[in-house]
Image (cartoon, rainbow, N blue to C red):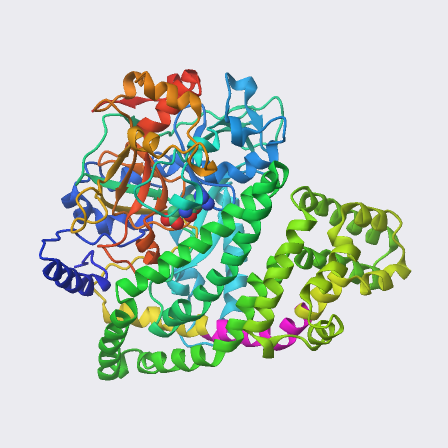
Amino acid sequence: MLMSLTKNYRLVLLKTAFVAAAFGCFFNTIAKEGMWLPANLKKNEADMKSQGLEIPVDKIYNANGTGLNNSIVLFGSGCTAEVISPKGLLLTNHHCGYGTVQGLSSKDHDYFANGFFAKNNKDEIPCPGLAVTFVRRMENVSNVILQNIPDTLDNPKRDSIISVRIKNLEKGWRFTTKMDATIKPLFNGNQYWVFLTETFKDIRLVGFPPNGIGSFGGDSDNWMWPRHTGDFSMFRIYAGKDNKPADFSADNKPYQAKNFLTINIAGYKEGDFSMVYGFPANTQEYISSYQLNQILKTTDPIRISIRTKKLECLSKNMSASRDIFLKYTSKRAGIANGWKKWQGEVKGLEQSNAIEMKKTEEADYQAWATANVDKLGYAHELLGKIQVNAVKVDSALKADTYISEAVFGIETIQQSATLDKILNLLRSSSMGDAAKNDSITKLAKATDAFFKNYDAATDKDMFQSLMPMYYKGIKSWTPIELRKSLKYYKGKWSAMASDVYNLSFMANQEKFNNFIAKIAVKDTLKIMSDPGWRLYNAVAQFRKLNITPLITQYNNNLAFYNRLYMNAQMTQYWNTNFYPDANQTLRLTYGKIEGLDPCGPANYSYQTTLDEAIAKDDPKVDEFKVPSKLKELYTKKDYGRWKVNNTVPIAFTATNHTSGGNSGSPVLNAKGQLIGTNFDRAWEGTMSDLHYDPKLCRNIALDIRYTLFIVEKFGDAGWLLKEMKMVKK
Ligand code: ARG
Ligand code: GLU
């Protein structure tokens, strides 16, 4: 019989008991770790029902086109969205639409300041480059992909056999289903699944509240609870005449969705069953303590310290000019998001003693593996090998982190990769002139997008802050050219920066365009004397020769050992229902609506309200400026049908195991109806990507009633609500 508990569960229970005893309070959360593959939910059904699920799991997912999976999409490159009307209306997070909306914004159309709500379909704004993908069906194809491949076959051989099989099998699935087919590894390569998908490319902006609502609390409140951010935006899928995916065309029609979510506006209470359905991107729940330690002690701290500097630079420059703000706001949000998440991760890993817990698990594993050598033949050697590899790569990893975060965090240097590509084209003897020109034109075009959001003075500031950090942080891993150059500038980074930003093509769009307009083969020399390219080239070459080979070898070794280690762990706990690490495939997680800290201060409610948001209003601080129209609605208590206890609920927390990529995911009740939109996690719990602790891990969701209140009362877009199906019970 399958148990629906993961192996960590036993330890989690022990720890929970310990914490409860220490705090003198009873803690009865059931650990709801797990991001389950929808097609495997039968194994969880009994557990889910005992927790409160009221619908059969094959309503959540099935291969016949009638499951809830047909209402969920991968949104853009990394978020989730859900279909909430028969006319293809999509709901996701504000921060998921942010980059797209930046592309649609200008000083005259400042959607961040003013918001945007279409008044009818005609108003909806096309979003070039944005696409959404449905997962219609998934099947385990491990039998075909892994047939007759021994576990211990070395990775290069194994990978080449597998990649041929994948290509052929995908082709077959495409042919028979007329859908896109992608085969992906799960459980570190111990299983392979095919995902049959449909991608729509004509997506239009429908609603986007101003930042004073949609990113209220900004980076200060990001990853934090309590939270008052109206983090939503709405888009619409458009389809061709046949209701199938089509490239953008003014003739396309709103997608007629057979499947869309019913919205439950009756609310919820603490303890209610909840599910989150979406596309978590990346977790590493089964890694060894050595790798965990590396994240905790090496990579996270380096990345945090570099980003602290980056953010100082950006804040200074962005607050000085609205123009610079508009150029950098999306990039800054991304930088700040990781920066804060990793801090929470470190805090949470320490607070929950994750390394020690892993070590205990490993001792247990090692004892089992040693006693059962004949079972797999390799299980007893794995941890030792993983440790040796991890230790060996440590300083190269440190250097690599500095290079990617600091050196290539300076856009002028990073973008000099374009000059490098042009240089290679000019030098190429196998390519004709016409083909060369064509490629150069394409590169130049892509560079336009870069310059649109680039300010040389801001980047120069960044250069002067980050280069010394890289240099001091890992001096023995810096290229000789850089050391010589620094000597030439008498140790003054500011002098080096002056030359880079006065002279480099990549620091001046006009100069770059003029160069490209008249480019000739002899211009290789011009590139080779460009100070931006010289830095880029020195560091990139050094990395390629001295660092990348070590890291690649490490990753290859690790992929091999981690696959076997995963298999061994699943063999040890043969009767445990394991979930695969996240890899941007569709997952369902379930848990309960629950406050953050039942043993802590009593004023930590599981839910926040508009009154609390208004209390945080601070017209002097951008992040906490409540728009005046929202304040008016508040003063008049003009809440319409969204009034609950004389206010409007904003956000709530639950114990769903989510990750990056679950932004915009629907939060569903026991009947599979929409009650909210997932948008974040509580700070101390962000380590759930590596280690789930039921005491600390909470996801944060926006109450659907706040979304609808804002659309109707703030955005005057009540017409959208008429499309939706709402129930009160
Ligand atoms: N932390 C959330 C997530 O990981 C929201 C990020 C957007 N908000 C921000 N202030 N940067 O995506
Ligand atoms: N905000 C995250 C995202 O963009 C989701 C929150 C999380 O990482 O849990 O996917």
Q: In the image, is residue 64 above or below residue 34?
A: above
Q: Residue furthest front?
A: 620
Nearer to the camera, 598 or 667: 598
Instruction: Answer yes or no: is residue 726 visible.
Output: yes
Res 700 quadrant in image: top left
Q: Does residue 308 appear to the left or right of 546 in the view shown?
A: left
Main SS class of the magenta portion in the image: helix
In the image, is residue 544 part of the stretch drawn in magenta? Answer: yes
In the image, is residue 417 part of the stretch drawn in magenta? Answer: no
**Which quadrant holds the N terminus?**
bottom left
Residue drawn at x 25%, y 70% as measured from the top left: 357
Q: Does residue 665 appear to the left or right of 329 in the view shown?
A: left
Please give the range of residues in magenta.
540-557
Q: Position of residue 210 (x, y in %)?
A: 48, 29
Residue drawn at x 45%, y 37% as measured from the top left: 621
Residue drawn at x 54%, y 29% as measured from the top left: 111
Nearer to the camera, 580 or 14: 14
Q: Position of residue 213 (x, y in %)?
A: 42, 31
Q: Does residue 501 appear to the left or right of 640 in the view shown?
A: right
Q: Position of residue 60 (x, y in %)?
A: 30, 39
The image quadrant where one finds ligand 1 is: top left
Q: Position of residue 552 (x, y in %)?
A: 54, 72
Instruction: Answer yes or no: is residue 420 visible.
Output: no
Count of picture labels:
0
